[in-house]
Image (spheres, rainbow, N blue to C red):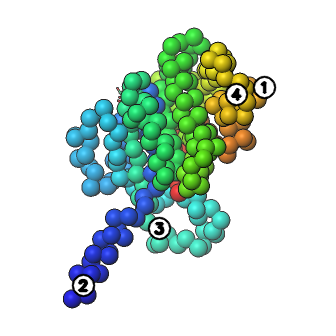
Amino acid sequence: LPSLVHLYFYSQTARTKVVPTFLLLGPSGAGKTALLTLLQKRSSDQENADASSTRTSQVPWRASLLLPSSIPLGSNKYRSDNDVSLKDKHPTRYVMIDTPGHGKLRDDQALSQLQNPVLRGVLFVVDASVLDSSESSSSRDIAAYLHDTLLVLQKRKTGKASSKTKANIPVLVAANKQDLFTALPPGAVKERLQTEIERVRTSRSKGLAAVGQEPDADAEEEVLGGGGEDKFTFKLMEDEYGISVDVVGGAVKGEEAGKGVRRWEEWIGGCL
Ligand code: GDP
């Protein structure tokens, strides 16, 4: 009767197998759901082919995806091409968790997901066409959300949690809707976001000072990028905390639907 025992252990190991997980963040309307639907189509994963019909946008939604085998993986970077023969190449399974972008649900439903110990990376989707005017409330909102996201990742790095949760979590800012003529190109999206995040950072640290917190070492950890004098840049996050932030343009829908999506997948592959 060994088969039953074997079956039991087999199912236990299968269940605990860790699938690398990515988090999809960004404000409502950025294109998260559209992107996930597209990735599902590309992954041709039949298990989840009709899962989208059951989706509600109020709760995080988990999709099992396959990365096309033609996308290079970060873990293969140091192997020569000859090592990985084409017939050995399989699509790589990963999980993407979509989150509600609505302001009130962000802390509970979206940012709390950043504590996930198997998290490999964050895709932060923005609508590049609403970032054009400097004083728009949407660019302030996007910057505040990205600021809060990066601050949680920073604290995850500096906090007292176990080393398991201290792995570097890179962030991809997907500058979506590049098909629209009002869309800022990725380089300008990066500049805009850095400038807006600097504003958020300044007003938040004034807020901390106002409630009487001394600028001691603890308070420094409360400020994005640390309490230094330098203006905020994504490079600062990389240099100080090992958190890389890349901005890559693309379009999920519209006349150029699918443009740049492969580069987003390549970024995902680089994290695997
Ligand atoms: P979510 O709230 O972030 O999940 O955003 P959705 O995926 O629901 O997309 C919001 C709207 O933007 C929808 O009407 C999409 O069709 C549209 N959309 C998404 N991606 C693009 C894009 O690349 N270009 C254009 N023109 N529209 C897009």
- Residue 155: x, y in percent? 60, 39
**In the image, is the residue at mark 1 within 8 Å of ligand 1 by its beta carbon?**
no
- The image shows residue 171, relative to residue 67, as above or below, that is above
- Dot 1 or dot 3, earlier in sequence: 3
Residue lying at the far right in this picture: please name it: 229
Three-letter amino acid code at the position of disc 2 = Ser
Three-letter amino acid code at the position of disc 3 = Lys
Separation (CA) of disc 1 from disc 4: 9 Å
Three-letter amino acid code at the position of disc 4 = Phe
- Residue 227: x, y in percent? 73, 29
Query: In which quarter of the view is residue 215 placed?
Result: top right
The residue at which mark 3 appears reads as 89
- Residue 224: x, y in percent? 65, 31
Q: Nearer the viewer, residue 31 or 98?
A: 98
The residue at which mark 4 appears reads as 232
- Dot 3 or dot 4, earlier in sequence: 3
Q: How crowded is mark 2: few (under 14 residues within 10 Å), some or many (20 or more)?
A: few
Separation (CA) of disc 3 from disc 4: 41 Å
The residue at which mark 1 appears reads as 229
Q: Nearer the viewer, residue 92 or 152?
A: 152
Three-letter amino acid code at the position of disc 1 = Glu
The residue at which mark 2 appears reads as 3
Separation (CA) of disc 1 from disc 3: 48 Å
- Dot 2 or dot 4, earlier in sequence: 2
- Residue 173: x, y in percent? 55, 35
